[in-house]
Image (cartoon, grey):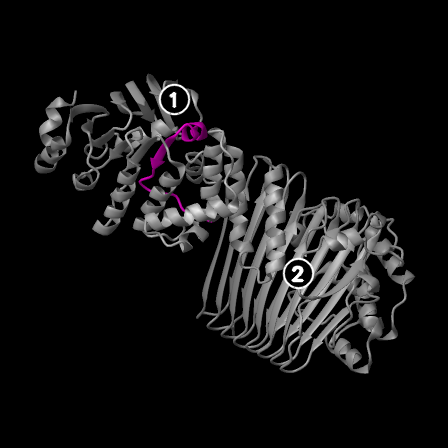
Amino acid sequence: MLQIKELVAEIDGKQILNGLNLTIGDGEVHAIMGPNGAGKSTLGNVLTGRDGYEVKSGEVLFNGKNLFDLEIEERAREGMFLAFQYPVEIPGVSNMEFLKASLDARRKHQGLEELSSFDFMKLARETSAKVSLDAAFLKRGVNEGFSGGEKKRNEILQMMLLEPQLCILDETDSGLDIDALQVVANGVNAMRDGKRSFIVVTHYQRLLDYIVPDHVHVLAGGKIVKSGDKELAKELEAKGYGWLEGEVA
Amino acid sequence: MTQPVQPSDFQKRALTLAQQRSAPAFLQTVRQQGLDEFGQIQWPGRKTEMWKYTTLRPVEAFANAEWPADDVAADGEQLASLPELDATRLVFVDGIFDGAASDELPDGVRLFSQADEAARVVLDQYLGKIAKDIDPSRRNLFAALNDAWLTDGVLVYVPKNATLEKPLYVVHLSTAQAAERVANQRLLVVLEQGASADLIEHYLSADDASASFVNTLTEIHVGDNARLSHTRLNLEHEASSHVGAVHINLQRSAVANGFTLAEGGELKRLDYQINHCGEGAELNLNGLYLGRHQQHVDYHTTIEHRVPNCTSQEVFRGIVGDRAKAVFNGRIHIHQDAQKTLAELNNRNLLTSNTAEVDTKPELEIYADDVRCAHGATISQLDETALYYLQSRGIELPQARMMLSYGFINEVLETLPHEGIRTALQKRLRQRFVEEI
């Protein structure tokens, strides 16, 4: 699904990723943990192509294609999805319009017909029910005045509608109470179908109790310094990141 | 009477045109007042504060203009394209009333030319007298011209505690025959104590219309506890010039809700002059302006708080692209006696090209010490983070730009009370931004 090789990237002239290697197979769930400033969010931003992040060297293959040949929107249509740590509020643009435009773009790329307004509305309502988001939120401006939990549920709603191949969850658990966390986790788990892959970026073990990863990586100093299975997450929770510092080159 | 040092060619022509048309005798006083005033005002130039960012060259080009023919009629196709409204429709074509295209006039609505004795009393009391007591340096040259050119107009009179049954929808259509012609449009609305009315003014052009100049003045008296809803759309095409003014007096506990939208043209200039004359009056004014190509659009609003306990809420947003230019000047003047005033003015502008220009100037002048006032003006570009968010969902950059531009004004459009107009405008403006993709 995704191969990251020796990725070096910087923002504002400051190098954040220092030769990162990571391979994600089909259907796998990878958790990426690490201290603040390790480059966790940068990874998501570089993969989705956000302006301001400059790739200095290295290579990323997404389903065999060179990711850096693709524009931001092309990556999304190819099936990459980033659930934002801080979803953006866009007053004046209705959530419904936004969701339909996104799904239309993805379907068109897949060679599918756009959904009729009626069918889309039905699908959007059903999906919002799955993430316990009142259908009234579909009519409001994108994320406008949503609480932290509502924004995160709106991200999962988008993910479920777009049915991406690779989902990157950037600290989706931050600021969530247990109920909301469970809704988000259920949404993710419902989408695990043996083919779709996930990168779950988080600070805390807590989320991984609900979304059980196949692999856990520690990102520190801009590279993966340790990898293991779900037990590694528990070890990190108990010991913190300090004991790994020796491993940061 | 002192003549200006040098009356402009347009001024001279305008005065000649005024003499070419006759008017009912009872309008003569107002006409004469206009002639005197317009004739002696120094034609504005770059150094005239009120016209600092807006050149009058497009108006000066009408120095050889004629009046339009009296027998023009509205094009059926044009009329069919108007939004569906449960309203009384009055149609003017190049400034001339088109009875065939208009609904029957309801009680309380009549043309000046058909004024009976009672209506003449109202005209005598209010016509040309609303919001007159403003700062002389801000006197409206074109309001004086409207007086001078006055031959007819629409009078809306709603008596005490009565309600104008349906909204009044006044349509002004400029046709191809209006090229090198001038048009004059005048409305007077008088709401007595506890009365209410809903007025919509819609200015548009025929598809094949060319350069035209329309000068408009709408005067509104909102009596004690009366309620006004006023919507004004300036959607003439871009070859047209329009200079217009809306003058409103608000009496005790009167409420006025205004919405205004202007698409740019050769010259689009709108002045709102609003007077809080009675305590407890409330004003809400929302506006939008859009400029593209080489268009020019200019809003000047002046709100005079003369008495205590009044409120003003004013929100204007503009989007300006290509080589277009927009001007916004929002003045709020709080007099010494106007304690406990609550006034807010917010103006936000979106620039969608490097060559577009916005000149915005909120002016707050406060002489009372116990008031709550806020004003803000911003000029910005589309939000990069929001663009990235949309793109990261597969939406192409041009479409993302369109969605954000439209969203910026849609927030204000959503405050429009008339669903038919709101829907029609949303469709029109969305299409406008789609065209720009």
Mark 1, residue position: A67
Image quarter for residue B186? bottom right
**Residue A192, x across and y down, in percent:** 28, 35
Towards the viewer: B285 or A85: A85
The residue depicted at 31 percent of the width and 49 percent of the height is A148
For marks 1 and 2, give the one nearer the viewer: 1
**Residue B153, x across and y down, in percent:** 79, 67
Towards the viewer: B265 or A233: A233
What residue type is disc 1 on?
Answer: Leu
Instruction: Report helix, strand or loop for mark 2.
Output: helix
Q: Which mark is residue B138?
A: 2
Instruction: Report helix, strand or loop for mark 1.
Output: helix
- B217, above or below B437, in the image: below
Q: CA distance from mark 1 to mark 2?
A: 61 Å
**Residue A52, x across and y down, in percent:** 39, 29
Chain on which label 2 sits:
B
Locate the C terminus of chain A and report the quarter of the image it occupies: top left
Q: Is residue B374 visible?
A: yes
Query: Is residue A86 rendered magenta in the image?
Result: yes
The residue depicted at 79 percent of the width and 49 percent of the height is B212
What residue type is disc 2 on?
Answer: Arg
Q: For mark 1, does the 10 Å Cα neighbourhood hold few (<14), some (14 to 19), or many (20 or more) residues?
A: many
Residue B42 falls left or right of residue B233:
right
The residue depicted at 59 percent of the width and 41 percent of the height is B433
The residue segment tinted magenta is A72-92
Q: For mark 2, does the 10 Å Cα neighbourhood hold few (<14), some (14 to 19), or many (20 or more) residues?
A: few
